[in-house]
Amino acid sequence: MKLTIRFNWLAFIFAALTHTAVANETFKFDASHSTIGFRVHQFLGTTNGKFRQFSGNIDFDRQHPGGSSVSARIQVSSIDTAIKKRDDHLRSTEFFNAGKFPEITFKSRSVRQTGPQSGDISGDLTMHGVTKPIILHVKLATPLTNEALPERTRWEVTAEPPLKRGDFGLMFGSATEAVSGISQNVAIKIDIEAVRSH
């Protein structure tokens, strides 16, 4: 009898632990309905661009948001500023060197809730072979129903302060830098639509 009771308790505890382990909700980026964009000022105006190929996961713990995590991979060669000659130059060895550093990656370290549907994600951004810590400000733009997330979610992401391209070694030659007046600051604006992974 004691053995049976002990077995039942062990089964109950195992079931509870198993439930906790899978409690997080995982969402995958839907690149066709998402945008990873950036903006850079220079003497003659502002350059807006985006990356067309990327993937990522959001592991969301709605009961304990601090237990959530995010990871993303961006293909550098997919950069698009609407001018092919400029995009080819950005992919070249003078800037991104896409052949040697084909991906930009982000992996979260911690998540801090700042509001009912907002939070700060601290993590490591690796670009051009350099890894730096950054903080992303995230807002869940999808209305919640009884604290549950729907099959699709939309997230708005910004970084403040802006990224400094020099921190990642992303500098043109001195002559180009002097003539163009390209700002060191790169503002990012990301809109992610993510689909629940079953």
Image (cartoon, helix red, strand yellow):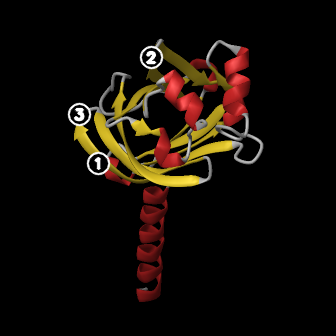
Residue farthest to the left?
115
Q: Residue 31: which quarter of the image? A: top right
Q: In front of the other: label 3 or label 1?
A: 1
> Disc 3 marks which residue?
116
> Disc 2 marks which residue?
43
Seen in the picture, residue 12 relative to 148 is either above or below; the reply is: below
**Mark 2 and mark 3 in contact (Cβ < 8 Å)?**
no
> Disc 1 marks which residue?
112
Q: Which residue is drawn at 32% across and 52% down?
A: 66
Residue 64 seen anywhere in this rendered image of the structure: no
Callout 1: SS = strand
Q: Residue at x 45, y 74 (%)?
A: 8
Q: Which amino acid does label 2 sit on?
A: Phe
Callout 2: SS = loop
**Quadrant location, the N terminus:** bottom left
How far apart in space, not on screen, are marks 3 and 1 (Cα)?
A: 11 Å
Q: Where is residue 165 in the image (x, y as percent from the top left)?
A: 49, 39
Q: Which residue is drawn at 62% across and 53% down?
A: 129
Q: Residue at x 38, y 31 (%)?
A: 158
Q: Position of residue 104 (x, y in %)?
A: 61, 43
Of mark 1 and mark 2, the one earlier in the sequence is 2
Characterize the local packing of mark 3: few (<14), some (14-19) or many (20 or more) Cα atoms within 10 angstroms. few
How far apart in space, not on screen, are marks 1 and 2 (Cα)?
A: 37 Å
Q: Position of residue 28 (x, y in %)?
A: 58, 36
Q: In front of the other: label 3 or label 2?
A: 2
Of mark 3 and mark 2, the one earlier in the sequence is 2
Q: What residue type is labelled 1?
A: Arg
Q: Which amino acid does label 3 sit on?
A: Pro
| Number of numbered tags placed on the structure image | 3
